[in-house]
Image: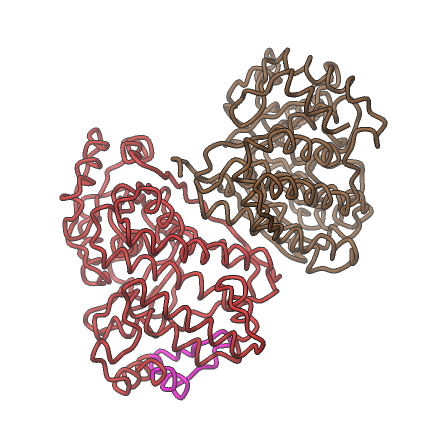
Chain colours: A red, B brown
Amino acid sequence: MINFTYHNPVKIVFGKGTIPELKDLVPSGHKVMLLYGGGSIKQNGVYDQIRNALSEFDVTEFSGIEPNPRYETCMRAAAQAKEQKAQFLLAAGGGSVMDAAKFIAVAALYDEAVDPWEIMEHRKPVAAALPIGMVVTLPGTGSEMNSFSVISRESSGEKLAFGSPHCYPKFSILDPETTFSIPMRQVENGIVDTFAHVMEQYMCAAGSAPLTERQAEALLLTVIEQAPKLLANPKDYELRANLMWCATIALNGSLGCGVETEDWSSHMLGHELTARYGLDHARSLAVMMPAVHRHQLKRKLPRLVQCAARVWNISAINDLVRADKAVDRMEEFFRQTGMSTRLYEYKIDANEAADITVERLSKRGVMLGENGDLGPKEIREIFMLAK
Amino acid sequence: MINFTYHNPVKIVFGKGTIPELKDLVPSGHKVMLLYGGGSIKQNGVYDQIRNALSEFDVTEFSGIEPNPRYETCMRAAAQAKEQKAQFLLAAGGGSVMDAAKFIAVAALYDEAVDPWEIMEHRKPVAAALPIGMVVTLPGTGSEMNSFSVISRESSGEKLAFGSPHCYPKFSILDPETTFSIPMRQVENGIVDTFAHVMEQYMCAAGSAPLTERQAEALLLTVIEQAPKLLANPKDYELRANLMWCATIALNGSLGCGVETEDWSSHMLGHELTARYGLDHARSLAVMMPAVHRHQLKRKLPRLVQCAARVWNISAINDLVRADKAVDRMEEFFRQTGMSTRLYEYKIDANEAADITVERLSKRGVMLGENGDLGPKEIREIFMLAK
């Protein structure tokens, strides 16, 4: 087990009817800026619950944060926060609104003369951020219990990530009842996103961090068990609650404790598909993740063999066969969860996608893989396996 | 899954060579009071590492905190902390020192005219505590990542617990190398304590919190796999690290998320054995836990059956047989870990132990069990099963 630091100060308030607790969670007297997306929270009652809970606060609003939230939108929100002297940001929505809130919280305290995009483009450390609270209505990204954010820049077509301890939410409210009205497509996305988050961390360990590995397996087993039930019974509170909690734990840092390295290749490649072709984030993962694992089968062999045995219950004499079957089962699980898993299904030309991705990643000097040694050649090969 | 709040703000710094990080972890300029036990930290080099790391701090010391730390000792430490105007408590040791630190941190800020024992005896809420940091040298109790403490009062022979959000350590340093010099008896104790902490939480859920249950099983499986290896290879860093991390996660609150109730009967009964007969905490658990589960076999049947299948890999047609075998396997595991599991092995008369326990718990009005309905009759029956 390698040395690590784990510090996750987010307060989780989980369960039905918990939104009214906002009145005690938001620091009293703070001027609140409520951030949300296209207005679904006005239809499902979440907006009213929030405004009622905050009836004694001075609340302003910024709405219209889009899926794959844009730098341009966030900068407008940050300007408004500055102008209105917001002291607390409350994000109500899914990963897009939560991720946007983190960037807005940073940008709102940025020097006018400097472009905060530098925290992504040049990995400039974040010096400060407004405090943030969250009401999660769309589980999957895990943004509610971590310090990471992914923002897209329309002008350059880039989609980049940043993270900072300053960006942990002070609290996150998770009421599974708020998820009942989510379109099924989004429910499917949340399930696959959760699964993929675990895999990106788990597929780099094998025996090096036994407890963390078993915790990752616990999460995969739970998602595999609960997801089909939820898709069949979308109004079941317990199933909603179980998958909502899985999404949070999948990316709260606990599954990285003591793990030697992580491999976010599928996410990096998926982000490029989203940036160029507009694929939902989870759907881009469902395409890229099986391809990445097929390409890296030998390198990840011990981990895939362990995953085959403990998660998929696959017995086969030959390790390569077991590993291969584990990837097949993963792709099958994605398909059962309503995903397409091949580029052709989205009418995306694999060569074109590879060209664009190689160009973008090369420009930023990014190499992929657990050892950072996957370059243009390997990326092209992975796209061919995804076609 | 029931509603819950989860908020664990402890910063964990894990790995070899991490003690020097103290100099950045303790708030600069704070007057530190170093708390430790019988002086083993002077033999294993931990003391020197700490003093070196804090060479620029004003550090006073209080040593001699005993196993099952006493109220009387803590009150002396609190008086010293008051007198010396300590601003930060640094606990270096195992559960006893860490638990003591939490009580001292509270008592040092208590009104002179009031006895802080009221937080245990009358469950008076804690209003404030000095900030605490920890250097763990003896894993098992999990005190390094929770807000709980158990203190014994010599004058009354009581052993009582309290907890408060004010008592979370600000940080805990876990360097597995510091554990190499622990006597094997203590290593065994830590393993059984860890295992027992998981069981007390896990044995009340069954299907109600699927992810949390699988995480509990992940921990039990890891302990069962790693413990015999460690007992055979006590100088193996990886094995030390794995069990140290298991001990922390076992009682950091994460295994209670969404679980309907917890049942700390074995701990409550074990505390009485320790208070009266001086049994090590873990050894008292190894006696009482199998007896409690045999007594509650029918009530805990679904959980024991799940545990039998997922943890012990027991297949039997009859649920009662499976559950019974799961308890047998647990007792076997305790014995393999060097524990006696019956009262007669300690020359303790079961009737006498039952009498004393019933009297003490009755006096405090305590009923045991997940439904709080185990009284004198049931407690006597449990002691008979442990004889």
Does residue B349 belong to the magenta stretch?
no
Picture quarter with the N terminus of chain B: top left
Q: Residue furthest front?
A: B317
Q: Quadrant of residue B122?
A: top right
Q: Which segment is the magenta one? A: A361-383
Q: Position of residue A284 (x, y in %)?
A: 30, 70
Does residue A363 belong to the magenta stretch?
yes
Residue lying at 33% horizontally and 69% vertically, measured from the top left: A286
Q: Position of residue B377 (x, y in %)?
A: 65, 16
**Res. B23 in view:** no
Q: Position of residue B326 (x, y in %)?
A: 64, 43
Q: Foreground residue, A135 or B3?
A: B3
Total number of numbered labels? 0
Q: Foreground residue, A185 or A318?
A: A318
Residue lying at 36% horizontally and 42% vertically, measured from the top left: A171
Q: Quadrant of residue B200?
A: top right
**Res. B247 in view:** yes
Drawn side of residue A283 relative to residue A331, left or right: left
